[in-house]
């Protein structure tokens, strides 16, 4: 009798446990769907799967090596989609991170790996694969490496939709099956940044210079080129008079950026304070960063970072340096992600160039030349005209050499300009003589 009561009681407890579990769990679809943690707002959860199906194309010395590189290609494609606009910023860095993965198994559902097609030519294997990716593992890896943006965030459990099915059976070459992932910079050339500070708004130039150097270090860490601080200060001290003559009240920083052929400039403002406690120094920093397009001075984003006062150092200066480093690093990460939408739009639009044409005696001919050339560019605006020279700003999807070829081709359409020749080129600025 006691045994029967015990069994009945045990069954009741089991049933209660099952009902309680069912009441608190949420079914969200097929086996690959995700149950998110309760703190994540539903509005930021993307539709899709935690194990989405992606395709990849790999090349290797043997079939296994080619398949592994195909998996890496699939991981790169998923990363680009997950990072959204920020994928353009971190493209090279992500590729290096994924290339260094030794064991790929944690990042895929191995049973889903399929080799769809392969080729062998001159000692080179090419493998086209499909595989389901472990998005949580990929997200963890990128965040561990300090890469955030788009859907790669601390509060988002990453889900992506399956990649669109591809047609490969009738493809002439496997190399043509998959489209490049994401947007790339025009001609693969990344923009150059100039970082500086407004001397009229800075109480401690040494700390401001430290902030600029740290911002440049951050840009270097994500594979962007920057104008060195010494170059900025050199041109500023040597040409202040020329700046005043040319621009009047215009921004000195924008003027320097145009002279040094920077694509974007970042204005830094920083303030730090310290206090001493128990023979140690503690500091906090306020860091403000504003990004602008160097050619138009249009804003590309602004951020403000306030660190706490827990940054500790053995000296007052070391505590300040630590606080500034923390604030600038956080600020640069945020400003680059904030401006990434504009970077993507600018990359799609093309590269800005400055064009100067000397000896433009005949305005009627030059207007016809401008209209003909403009039809071959993204945009073209004449900013000044005189019989001695005309200045233009333009946007073009191509290199400076491609642009020069296009100018020569256009000039040949006009008998009075068929003698046009280049006299000077530096960075994204080019000068021609009409030959008249």
Image (cartoon, rainbow, N blue to C red):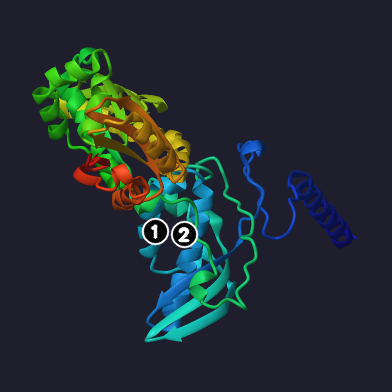
**Residue 106, x across and y down, in percent:** 49, 65
Task: Identify the residue at horizontal 90%, vertical 60% (top origin).
Answer: 1
As helix, strand or loop, the secondary structure at mark 1 comes to helix
Task: List the residue tagged with mark 2.
Answer: 76
Looking at the rendering, which quadrant does residue 286 occupy? top left
User: Where in the figure is residue 146, as x and y percent of width and height?
Assistant: 38, 45
User: Residue at coordinates 84% horizontally, 57% vertically from top-left?
Assistant: 11
Residue 378 versus residue 347: which sits nearer the camera? 378
Q: Which of the two residues, 410 or 107, is positioned nearer the viewer here?
A: 410
In the displayed structure, would residue 392 be above or below residue 269?
below
Q: Residues within 10 Å of mark 2 (few under 14, many from 20)?
A: many
Q: Residue furthest right?
A: 1
Residue 279 visible in the displayed image: no
Q: Residues within 10 Å of mark 1 (few under 14, many from 20)?
A: some
Q: Give the residue furthest to the front.
A: 415
Seen at 54% across and 54% down, the residue is 136
Tell me what residue is drawn at x 73 percent, y 47 percent.
25
Dots 1 and 2: beta carbons under 8 Å?
yes
User: Residue 152, position in %: x, y?
Assistant: 50, 45
The disc label shown at residue 170, or none: none
Q: Is residue 269 above or below residue 138?
A: above
Query: On residue 95, which mark appears?
Result: 1
> Which SS class for mark 2?
helix
- Compare residues 364 and 4 and report the one nearer the observer: 364
């Amino acid at each position: 009798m006691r045994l029967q009561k015990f069994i009945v009681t045990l069954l009741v407890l089991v049933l209660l446990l099952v009902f309680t579990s069912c009441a608190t769990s949420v079914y969200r679809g097929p086996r690959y769907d995700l149950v998110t943690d309760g703190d994540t707002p539903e509005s930021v959860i993307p539709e899709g799967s935690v194990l989405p199906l992606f395709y990849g194309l790999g090349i290797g010395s043997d079939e296994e090596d080619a398949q592994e590189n195909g998996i890496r290609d699939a991981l790169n494609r998923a990363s680009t989609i997950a990072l959204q606009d920020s994928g353009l910023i971190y493209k090279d860095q992500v590729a290096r991170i994924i290339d260094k993965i030794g064991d790929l198994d944690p990042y895929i559902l191995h049973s889903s790996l399929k080799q769809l097609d392969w080729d062998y030519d001159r000692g080179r294997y090419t493998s086209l694969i499909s595989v389901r990716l472990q998005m949580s593992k990929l997200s963890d890896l990128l965040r561990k490496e300090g890469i955030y943006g788009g859907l790669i965030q601390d509060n988002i459990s990453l889900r992506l939709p399956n990649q669109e099915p591809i047609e490969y059976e009738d493809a002439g070459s496997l190399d043509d099956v998959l489209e490049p992932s994401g947007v790339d910079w025009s001609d693969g050339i990344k923009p150059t940044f100039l970082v500086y500070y407004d001397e009229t708004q800075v109480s401690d130039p040494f700390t401001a210079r430290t902030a600029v150097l740290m911002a440049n270090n951050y840009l270097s860490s994500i594979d962007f080129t920057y104008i060195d601080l010494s170059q900025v200060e050199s041109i500023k001290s040597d040409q202040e008079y020329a700046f005043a003559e040319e621009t009047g009240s215009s921004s000195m920083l924008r003027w320097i950026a145009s002279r040094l052929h920077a694509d974007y400039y970042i204005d830094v403002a920083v303030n730090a304070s310290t206090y001493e406690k128990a023979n140690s120094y503690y500091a906090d920093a306020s860091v403000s960063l504003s990004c602008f397009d160097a050619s138009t001075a249009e804003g590309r984003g602004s951020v403000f970072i306030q660190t706490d006062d827990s940054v500790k150092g053995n000296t007052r200066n070391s505590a300040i340096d630590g606080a500034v480093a923390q604030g600038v690093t956080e600020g640069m990460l945020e400003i680059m992600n904030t401006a990434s939408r504009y970077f993507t739009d600018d990359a799609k639009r093309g590269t800005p160039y400055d064009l100067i044409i000397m000896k433009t005696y005949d305005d009627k001919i030059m207007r016809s030349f401008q209209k003909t050339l403009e039809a071959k560019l993204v945009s073209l605006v004449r900013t000044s005209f005189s019989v001695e020279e005309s200045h233009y700003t333009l946007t073009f999807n191509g290199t400076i050499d491609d642009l020069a070829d296009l100018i020569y081709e256009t000039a040949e359409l006009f008998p009075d300009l068929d003698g046009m020749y280049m006299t000077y080129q530096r960075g994204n600025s080019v000068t021609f003589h009409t030959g008249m």
